[in-house]
Amino acid sequence: MRTFWVVLCFSLLFAPIAQAEPHANVTLWYDKPAADWEREGLPIGNGAMGAMITGSVASDTIQFNEKTLWTGGPGSPGYDMGLAPQSQKEALVKVQALLNAKVQATPEEVAAILGHPVSGYGDYQSFGEIKLTFPNASDAPKAYRRSLDIARAVASVTYEDKGVRYRREYFASCPAGVIVVRLSASKPGKIAFTAGLTAPDNRSAMRTAKQGRITETGALKDNGLKYEAQLQVTAAGGSRRDNADGSVTIAGADSAVLILSAGTNYRMHYPDYRGADPHAAVMAKVDAAAKKSYTALLTAHMRDYSPLFNRVGFNLGGVLPDKPTDVVRANYGKGDEPADRALEALYFQYGRYLLLASSRAGSLPANLQGVWNKSATPPWNDDYHVNINLQMNYWLADLTNLPEAATPFYDFIDGLVPPGEISAGRMFGTRGWTVFLNTDVWGFTGVISWPTAFWQPEAGAWLASQYYDHYRYTLDKSFLQKRAYPVMKGAAELWLEALVVDPRDGKLVVSPSYSPEHGPFSAGAAMSQQIVYELFSETAEAARLAGDPAFAAKLDTAREKLDPGLAIGKWGQLKEWKEDWDDAKDEHRHTSHLYALHPGFAISPLTTPALAEAAKVTLKARGDSTTAHGEAGTGWSKAWKMNFWARLYDGDHAHLLLAQLLKENTMANLWDAYVGPPFQIDANFGSTAGMAEMLLQSQSGVIDILPALPKAWPQGSVHGLKARGDVIVDIAWNEGRATHVILHAGHDGAITLRTPLFGGKFTLTDAVSGKPVELTGTGERRSFTAHRNARYQLQFVH
Ligand code: FUC
């Protein structure tokens, strides 16, 4: 009888947890453990830490990361931030003279004048693994399910074994700074396992276990960076034993909770990049979390996470079939339209989930793999490439209403300014700051791997422009004055001094300039010019807002002499270089000369129709989605092209690229694959931004409703997207036309709308009082005066 009541109480206790998967359309699930970390593992993260859930039954490996564990930098042999010891100004002038004489040069020719060896560039590291071994688990459990509910940011594994139903839950709490795992069963006394920590062998690792707390301390051999991880194992019922090898064994327990935290003595501070020993901070986090109940930890996690995630809802009228996510993905595009629509909406929200999991305040920004990496030598060092990739990681932040997630981006770029000033002085002999193609966490602001052409000095300007865009979204004057303007001004100062006069036409140009990863070296490649032009325009605006009109005037004068990098070539294409060298058969993955279309603002079908047509010609040649393979078919390249097509108001083409991404570049866990593995997260983020751009745009001073709706999305709704000017927008549509739009104004002021599909037939009311609101303007553009915190409703008469 007693057993009956215990079992009943357990079933009741277990029931709410077992049922806790209500979000079918935002849950990824699988009927097997992950056989492959990269393709099948399920990622969780709290910004600073990440973990991968693979969920094997007899032994569960939870690989984890903490963002600051990097080799390289100070302490690593020969580290010099990628800078030559002496000024490069003379060498630079020689390269400029070479280009004036020959028009173009190879990387080898330029390296012979300007190149120097680099050492001590780091690699992002795996922190280690939690290993759980279950002595009583059978090899053939029943009803196995591994899932990730992205509305709650909780992963779980459930299965039945010998008449007992087991459940594992995993989440990464941002408020608590820990990763939490709970093991439970439908019958008492059934939880038995040994938990241990492992680490790669490129470090000294000391492990102890005391009162269920596993502590691992050590330092990386490469640079002496100190690290620490602590794992607290607590069980309800049964017994617990600390083992001499630093593991902990639980037997006969009813349930168990594991709490993990990890850190290093890294500090984002030039030039030492070292801070306090990680011991006290790691211990404090695990101690504080271990005092709380599992339910309290989970509640605090969801109170933090869910309101951010729930700001945006996206529905294309689809339904996910009751099939594992890998099967749904593999069937994508094969005729089940409702399933395809539901997968697209899930993929959109997954981008937002991944951003929240890999980028929260107080840590480094999302790197090439977000926060997840299991290697000591990951692809591209798992670093920060700043000729597209880091920028793309943050395109969705304001647009999909997660501005908090971009905090680490601004902190990181601010931190690059002091070393970037050394770089500007050493490489160009100018004031201001810059960074080149890529950077690590150690203030690397030089040029990597000569003689390959990793010359991209406009990267600093591009990054600075992203600050200004955040201001446009929020109209936050304090951010503009304190954060954006200083970074923008520094980037502009460099170019005011570093531009040279092009003898071909007397215009100011960037020289040497290198169209990203494509080349050759020349003066004034389109992308360089477009970025600097946009920087000067935006910095002049920002200077006026920040009360620095003298600097604005200097920029205006320089901009008049600047080549804007917008010219149409012989086959109607937008020219990639100043000379007409474009090859219509070239499918190179970078299409950076369309920067002015996206993320820049200079090209638009509304204001520059001829340039917009030329951009289309370029895009079609450069790996149209129907031809894209190899080079043109990398994940991030397709994601950028989605954004380009959306800005060209061609929703069908943008959707075609989305479909190609899902078919060709998306793995079972919905992570983006570069071309097959390796995993690279930028396309997850870039395609979420691209889908949002299909539904809402605001780059031209107008709120553009459904600017690029594809035929494949005849009906749907989205709420919570953000438009520049601090406006939140909700849209519902049917038969390809908006039916209902709500605008939430964050500021007083004029709002202009563009509603191309609706023939101007709509009314506007105050959504609360129902009173009509006066609209001015005609045709596609209508304006009204909005009041802060008011909601406005558009109704359409079709
Ligand atoms: C850019 C791209 C590569 C790769 C790397 C991480 O430089 O050209 O394709 O994505 O970033």
Image (spheres, rainbow, N blue to C red):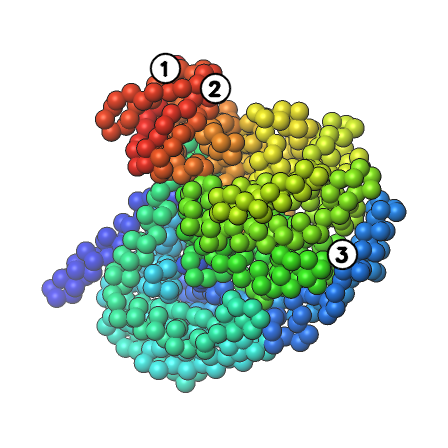
Q: Which residue is mark 2?
A: 780
Q: Position of residue 245 (x, y in %)?
A: 44, 82
Horizontal side of residue 516 vs 790, given as left or right: right
Q: Residue at x 47, y 29 (%)?
A: 702
Q: Which residue is mark 3?
A: 452
Q: Secondary structure at mark 2?
A: loop
Q: Is residue 263 or residue 113 the one in the foreground?
A: 113
Q: CA distance from mark 2 to mark 1?
A: 15 Å
Amino acid at pointer 1: Val
Q: Position of residue 650 (x, y in %)?
A: 57, 27
Q: Where on the picture, by quarter, is residue 791?
A: top left
Q: Earlier in the sequence, mark 3 or mark 1?
A: 3
Horizontal side of residue 245 vs 158, given as left or right: right
Q: CA distance from mark 3 to mark 2?
A: 49 Å
Q: Secondary structure at mark 3?
A: loop
Amino acid at pointer 3: Thr
Label 1 environment density (alpha carbons within 10 Å; few <14, some 14–19, many ≥20): few
Q: Which residue is mark 1?
A: 797
